[in-house]
Amino acid sequence: MEKRLYKSNTDKKIDGVCAGFANYFNIDPTLIRLAWVIFTLAGGCGLIAYIIAAIIMPREV
């Protein structure tokens, strides 16, 4: 079975992007969320990446 990257419909805080990445890599969504916050505070690239991912990633079926 082929893995696909989708935004999560069930475990989402804002748009489900972090939970989608966590499901894809089989890790805890909290770790992804923490990493995203660190990238955002460390230079702002995390916010831009989140917005782009929210626009590009399809919704889970």
Image: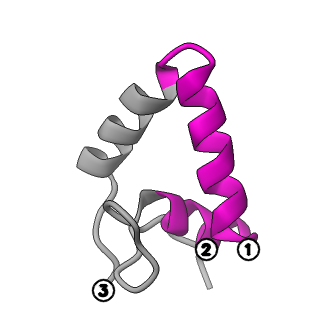
- Which image quarter: residue 38? top right
Is 46 placed above or below 30 here?
Answer: above
Q: Earlier in the sequence, mark 3 or mark 1?
A: 1
Q: Disc 2 on helix, strand or loop?
A: helix
**CA–CA distance between discs 1 and 2?**
5 Å
Quarter of the image where the C terminus is located: bottom left
Residue 35 located within the stretch drawn in magenta: yes
Which residue bears the numbered disc 1? 26
Q: Which label is found at residue 23? A: 2
In the picture provided, is 2 more to the left or to the right than 31?
left
Q: Earlier in the sequence, mark 2 or mark 3?
A: 2
**CA–CA distance between discs 3 and 1?**
18 Å
Q: Disc 1 on helix, strand or loop?
A: loop
Residue mark closest to the camera, 2 vs 3: 2
> Of all residues shown, which one is farthest toward the top?
43
Is 3 placed above or below 42 here?
Answer: below
Is 23 placed above or below 14 here?
Answer: below
Find residue 22 and report its horizontal and vertical position in percent: 63, 66
Circle 2: is it few (<14), some (14-19), or many (20+) Cα within 10 Å? some
Question: At label 1, which amino acid type do we have?
Answer: Asn
Find residue 44 and report its horizontal and vertical position in percent: 48, 18
Q: Which label is found at residue 38? A: none
Q: Disc 3 on helix, strand or loop?
A: loop
Which residue shows up at 31% across the image and 62% down it?
Answer: 15
Numbered-mark total: 3
Q: Which label is found at residue 61? A: 3
Residues tagged 1 and 2 counted as in contact (Cβ below 8 A): yes
What's the magenta region? 18-45
